[in-house]
Amino acid sequence: MPASQDRTLAAAGLILVYAMVIGFTDNYVQVIARDAGLWQFHLTRGCMAMAILGLFCAVTGRRLRPVNLRAVVARSLIHGVAMLIYFGALAFLPVAMVAAGLFTAPIFVLLISRFAYGHPIGPVRILAVALGFLGVLLVLGREATSGASLAALLPIAAGAMYAMGNIATREWCAEERAETLLAGFFIALGIFGAIGIVVLAIAGPQVPSGAEYFLMRGPVWPNAGFWFWTFVQAAGSLLGVGFMIRAYQITDAGRASVLEYVILPASAFWTWVIWGQTLHAQAWIGMALIVAAGSIIALRARQQEAG
């Protein structure tokens, strides 16, 4: 795609909205996790999201039929597997370490873009990725890098898969409607959720209530809180992820992936607003680096688009 069609500033705005929406909804996953399981959550959220998306398409006259079915299915499976590895790693690795692994995605985006697709990567973008990732490590703290082992490669694998899916958004699916890719994403996660429910129903592990058993909890009779917050998750994810998908369609994946670091400051903001939890000084320095990385990308893009 020609550089003149690279709308990085517009993508930055879309990703900012995505981060604020997802940062809010993800803060309530802990409420869902107290009594329900991850797999039931994925299946239920997927069904709700598809119902909302179907109603939206019926009202607006939009169609979900893909231009390239194989590309949409492949992208959906790649992102679905990335999330499966990510949540699977949470079962036996610290949350901070898993999050840090997933946030290696911009590094993989640069490598894949350069060596698989031949896209140039200049020193400015490399600097932005390095600053952003350093900021992530500072926000997450020592737990993100302590206790490294072979198992710690799992979240890095999730980051690589997530990067591949993000690159595919533009390289394979640039002509697709955002709602088509949304449908593929939620269908894939819904299928994985159904598989998880069946496996846990057969295995029958007995787990007590509590968010720490979110991954291993099988199907349960949901309460009103589960229905409400899962619906909020479905609606928020449709909006937020839809904006994120569109952002990756209109700008280079290497730029968009750096801008996506803003999800951490956005989540921290909502954590403070909702739960009153504050951050330590090191985390504030990390968020400043993340903002600096995004600013470098945005300012560089503005210069290029103006020129």
Image: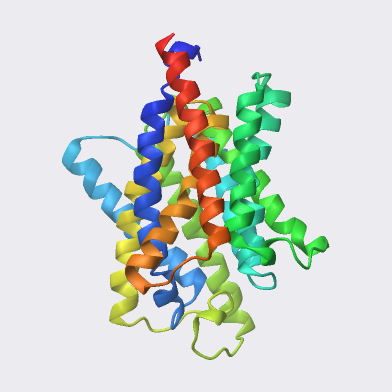
| Relative height, residue 204 to residue 193 (above, below) | below
* Position of residue 103 in the picture relative to residue 72 (left or right): right
Q: What residue is rendered at 43% in x and 15% in y?
A: 305
Any part of residue 190 in sight:
yes
Q: Position of residue 150 (x, y in %)?
A: 83, 61
Q: What residue is rendered at 36% in x and 81% in y?
A: 222
Figure quadrant of residue 118: top right
Q: Nearer the viewer, residue 234 or 12?
A: 12
| Relative height, residue 83 to residue 13 (above, below) | below
Q: Nearer the viewer, residue 37 or 89?
A: 89
Circle count:
0
Any part of residue 187 in sight:
no
Q: Residue furthest right?
A: 150
Q: Residue furthest front?
A: 281
Q: Position of residue 119 (x, y in %)?
A: 64, 19
Q: Position of residue 62 (x, y in %)?
A: 26, 35
Quadrant location, the C terminus: top left
Q: Position of residue 63 (x, y in %)?
A: 30, 35
| Relative height, residue 257 to residue 48 (above, below) | above
Q: Residue furthest left?
A: 59
Q: Describe the colour scheme in one phrase.
A: rainbow
* Position of residue 166 in the picture relative to residue 4 (left or right): right
* Position of residue 212 in the picture relative to residue 113 (left or right): left
Q: What residue is rendered at 64% in x and 82% in y?
A: 203
* Position of residue 232 in the picture relative to residue 170 (left or right): left
Figure quadrant of residue 87: bottom right
Q: What residue is rendered at 22% in x and 49% in y?
A: 55
